[in-house]
Amino acid sequence: MLLIDHLDHSAQLQLSYSSSHRTVFANREFEDAWEGLEPLHFLDSFHPIQLQTQMEPKSSTLAPLPEDNQDQPQSDHATPSAFASKPTRPPSQTSSQKYSPIDWKDYFDQEDDVCIPDTNDVFHIYTAGKEGPVVFCLHGGGYSGLSFAISARIIKDKARVVAMDLRGHGKSSTENEIDMSIETLCNDVQAVVKKMYGDTPPAIVLIGHSMGGSVAVHVAAKKMLPSLAGLVVVDVVEGTAIASLMHMQKILSNRVQHFPSLEKAIEWNARSGNLRNIESARISIPGTVKYDESQQCYRHRARLEETEQYWRGWYEGLSDKFLSSPVPKLLLLAGTDRLDRALTIGQMQGKFQMVVVRHTGHAIQEDVPDEFASLILNFISRNRIGPHGVEIPGIRRPSQPHA
């Protein structure tokens, strides 16, 4: 789960995973806690008699304490001392419990397969929500549609969500898994939307993360979706992406290739820093690996190392295409260092909205899904995007059946 966009985490992703690398926390012995502490010399300056004299109460100023009345009934609910009880320690989890997979059904409403006419291509989608514009989500290289699961659970209250497994990823099945040219990926998105909604699609807010962001930009710039009402690009910038291309094959070859179980695949992604939200990792990682019967283990689903010939085409000219897209635009970044010159100028000219999301890694929608969902809903509200496009107060559109 890397490709092109993980330059920030390249050092972390080159770490090999093995059971001998697990961090083990041991309790320190009680006497070690006192090692190195100096004796309390300040008590040596006081004489014991002086201490007793100073501590004894004076009868002229303090009243004597009342005698205990043994006949008086004792309270049944005496307030316990703060030092009398031990803090409750939460039950510990085993590695298999902590990293066990979570079913997507708690986040999306349903899954479906979209068969493209006159081909053998079948694209898998996850959907949620029944009303509002369609938030159409495209994941990054090596991820899957489940990357947007937690965010979808929030967004679906005010909009419909569609998360698609791109060619060569997740549960999608295509005639040519390696053909991931930007033209083919764009045509796939257009074909899925056409098959789902026909000639009268609802308003679509297209969201793309990483590689999916480049696909979203090209689709918008080419005006391939007539009902496109908004564009959101998540943590991908032309300059940074192209500069990282020379490192990608080495990163891909050095990552862990085989996992004995889904739990180990989830654990590796969490421990390597690839994903920082364990809940999201437990949902999305099962969609990024597949079981290899011949080797009796799990392997990465996407064969990214075989698609190198298409990498540059994903990102060349991306900034200009993003700026030229004729719809409201939002750029979400994990750091300001990702902003290149063209985007810096465009942002200063007010051509798009930009938000730098703090305390997150590359997969913003997974690391901070609540904040990501809030940003998407605010973008939709700010630009008045309704189920049929931009809504202007006082003007009613003719009702259309829901797709």
Image: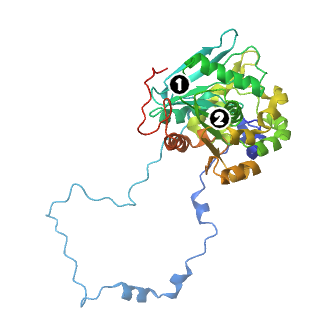
**Front-lying residue, 184 or 351:** 351
- Residue 38, percent from left and from top: 61, 75
- Residue 386, percent from left and from top: 48, 33
| Horizontal relation, residue 357 to residue 398: left or right | right
Characterize the local packing of mark 2: few (<14), some (14-19) or many (20 or more) Cα atoms within 10 angstroms: many
- What residue does disc 2 label? 208
Quadrant of res 130: top left
Query: Count the marks: how many?
Result: 2
- Residue 398, percent from left and from top: 43, 25
Whether residue 129 is situated above or below residue 330 in the rendered picture? above
Whether residue 230 is situated above or below residue 341 in the rendered picture? above
Asked whether residue 170 appears in the rendered view, the answer is: no
Quadrant of res 18: top right
Whether residue 345 is situated above or below residue 194 in the rendered picture? below
Q: What colour-coding does the image apply?
A: rainbow
Looking at the rendered structure, the secondary structure element under dot 2 is strand
| Horizontal relation, residue 100 to residue 215: left or right | left
What residue is shown at x 43% (from left), y 24% (from top)?
Answer: 399
| Horizontal relation, residue 125 to residue 308: left or right | left
- What residue does disc 1 label? 127
- Amino acid on which disc 2 is placed: Gly
Q: Quadrant of the N terminus?
A: top right
Q: Residue furthest left?
A: 71
Quadrant of res 157: top left
Asked whether residue 280 appears in the rendered view, the answer is: yes
- Residue 321, percent from left and from top: 73, 38
Disc 2 to disc 1, C-alpha distance: 16 Å
Of circles 2 and 1, the one toward us is 2
- Amino acid on which disc 1 is placed: Thr
**Front-lying residue, 102 or 52:** 102
Characterize the local packing of mark 1: few (<14), some (14-19) or many (20 or more) Cα atoms within 10 angstroms: many
